Structures are given as structure tokens and as C-alpha cells.
Image (cartoon, rainbow, N blue to C red):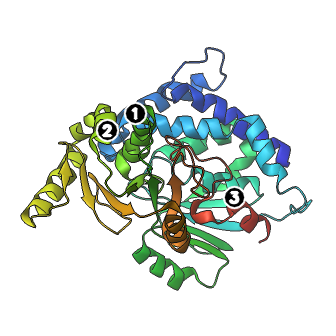
Amino acid sequence: MTISNRIKAFITLGNFLKQFSNLEMKQEDNVLNPLFYNDFKELIAIVHIHNAWFAEENVKNAIGSIAESIEEEKLIEWLSIYVKESPATKKPLYVAVIMAGNIPMVGFHDMLCVLLSGNKFIGKLSSDDKLLLPFVSKVLIAIEPGFNELIEFTDGQLKNIDAVIATGSNNSARYFEYYFGKYPNIIRKNRNSVAVLTGQESVNDLCLLGNDVFQYFGLGCRNVSKLFVPKGYKFDTFYESVFDFQNVVNNNKYANNYEYNKTVYLMSSNPTLLDNNFLLLKEDQSYSSPIGVLFYEYYDDLKSLNDRLENDKELIQCVVSNSSEIKNSIPFGKAQCPQLTDYADGIDTMRFLIRL
């Protein structure tokens, strides 16, 4: 396959996937529909039985985000960055990708990078997300049969590999480093995202921030798990603005986590705890908050806060704010809309793969 063949295949895949986003509209002339449409629609509807966190709306949101990212113009613009570095011919290397399972198809971007860099993808799926990506891969192979030799999923031990990309917790990262340290690797650890508020935000700004907090029930590393607020900040407007997200508590797993954490904090008589019956706000210096809890911390000034965020950048995936004074921040509502160049942990996956 030429790079052109591979790009065209992913563009065609994106057009197929767009039918299953939250803006679902079936394309009657899509040639893939007779083979895959009904089966994929059914899978999306029932995957929550396998993983209760994978609510249908969230699955559709993940699919829509992927479909939007692999539009023709975006793919070509992204790959143009690497044209001078890409070898004219390259023997495919065997790249093992060990995936997380916190949000639906979170490993898709790694698979995309491996295949478009001309390598062979060997995926080791999380038990929490083992249905969606193999189905999408089956569609991709139907589009371009040449991918059949370049896509493999395995439950077994990883052998005869040339490189590793692994995503997990800080604990699993130590395991990955022990077993795969001898290979060229990218090993990702725990990260969290934060929002910086100035007190000048509109209700609409805070409503968009609600997406960053509640989408995927807060399970993603790009979900906001902590707020930085100015001293004296009143949370009334924030709570009013995110009230429309109250349905998260209808998910049993979310509700159980929320009630458990509420009980723990109340038993410890935590004086900083705020509650609106579906989200707890707790003053805490940590970045990683439990499900159903959003940490907050007061800051003195934006300059010192910028310094703090820079010092802690290895712990932070992204920063959300509408303040121009906050370096490298993204707008409210965009935390879960990463572009192709928004690499996890800030490590350029494509450049790593090209240079193998």
C-alpha cells in the first residue's frame, strides 16, 4: 500500500463512522452500509452491557470525534508535518500498542499513527473496551484489504515486536518499563486536566466547562478533574450552569461512586465540601479527583499559577481557560475534542514511529 491508499482508506472509514455520531444521519448511498451499518448500530446500543461506563451517548460522542479527526483536509495537513522525515520505502516494523479502556476506542489514535507510519499494528485491548475497535478495524480492512496483514489483536504474550506504545496507570507504567524497557517505547502514566477560572466567565462558558468535567463521566485524562479559582470565588453560578448535567447520576456506577465519596467526606467532617446532589466540590491540592468529585484550589495571581502549572506539566494533560494569560490553554468545551496533533502526554507518537 502507498501512503495515498492508506489515507484514502481512513477518509472512507471516517465517512462511514459519521453516521453513528450524536448527529447521526444515515447515508443511503454508503457502500459499506449493507455489510456493517446494522451490526455496528446494534453494537453501539448494547456495548454498555459489557462496560456500564460506555453509555450510548458517550460511545457516539467518541465515534463522532474520531470521524471528525480523519477528514481528508485534516489528515493531509497533519501528515504534511512529517513529509521530510518519512522514508520513501520502509519495511513495516511490529509495534505493540497496549491500550487503556477508560473511554470508548481511546486507542484509535495510536492505531492510526502506527498504520499511517507504515508499520504493523499489534493491539492489546483493555478488557473494558475490547469490542468497538476490532469492529472498526474490520470495516477498515473491508475498505483496504492490504490492512489485513497489518492489523492484529492479541490476548496473549507480546513476542517478536520491535517497539511498544503503552498507556496505563502509574503502577502499570512500572510494569511496562520493566518488561518493555529494552524496546523503543512510549509509556504513558496518569495525567489529569484542569480548568482555570477568573470569575469573569459567562453562564455559557461554565456550561461548556460542564462538558469538560462530565463527558465520559470524568474518566478521561482530558476530563477536567480540578478547578483553580481566585480567592473569594463563589461557586453558585458554576453549579447553576452545570445543572443540566444532572443526568450523570442516573448511571449506577457514577451514582455509586458519588454516594461513596460523599459518605467518606461527610464522615471526616470536611468543612470545604460543597454538594449539589450529583457533584461534590472539595478543596484539595491534588490533581486526580475521584469520580463524582471535582477538586478546587484558590490561587493568588495568574502569574504564579502559570509557574505552578509549568512546574507540574508532567502531571497535566491539558489546561482549559478563556484567559489569554494562561499559557497553552484551550477553550471551554474543547477538552474532549483533541486534534490529530494533540498527542497524549505531549509525546509526538507519529515522529516516534517514523524514526524507528
| Mark 3: secondary structure | helix
Q: Earlier in the sequence, mark 1 or mark 3?
A: 3
Reading the image, the residue beneath label 3 is 114
Q: Mark 1 near mark 2, Cβ–Cβ under 8 Å?
A: yes
Disc 1 versus disc 3: nearer the observer: 1
Residue 11 spot, x, y in % from top left = 72, 36
| Mark 1: secondary structure | helix
Q: Nearer the viewer, residue 355 or 162?
A: 355
| Mark 2: secondary structure | helix
Q: Which mark is residue 237?
A: 2
Q: Going 57% across and 65% down the picture, which residue do you hit?
A: 345
Reading the image, the residue beneath label 1 is 203
Q: Earlier in the sequence, mark 2 or mark 3?
A: 3
Indicate the amino acid at tag 2.
Thr
Q: CA distance from mark 1 to mark 3?
A: 41 Å
Question: Compared to 148, does 315 lie above or below?
Answer: below
Residues packed near mark 3 inside 10 Å, few (<14), some (14 to 19) or many (20 plus): many
Indicate the amino acid at tag 1.
Val
Residue 163 spot, x, y in % from top left = 66, 73
Residues packed near mark 2 inside 10 Å, few (<14), some (14 to 19) or many (20 plus): some
Q: Is residue 188 visible?
A: no
Q: Going 69% across and 58% down the picture, which residue do you hit?
A: 114
Q: Nearer the viewer, residue 270 or 89?
A: 270
Residue 74 spot, x, y in % from top left = 74, 40
Q: Is residue 312 visible?
A: yes
Q: Going 29% across and 47% down the picture, which residue do you hit?
A: 234
Residues packed near mark 1 inside 10 Å, few (<14), some (14 to 19) or many (20 plus): some
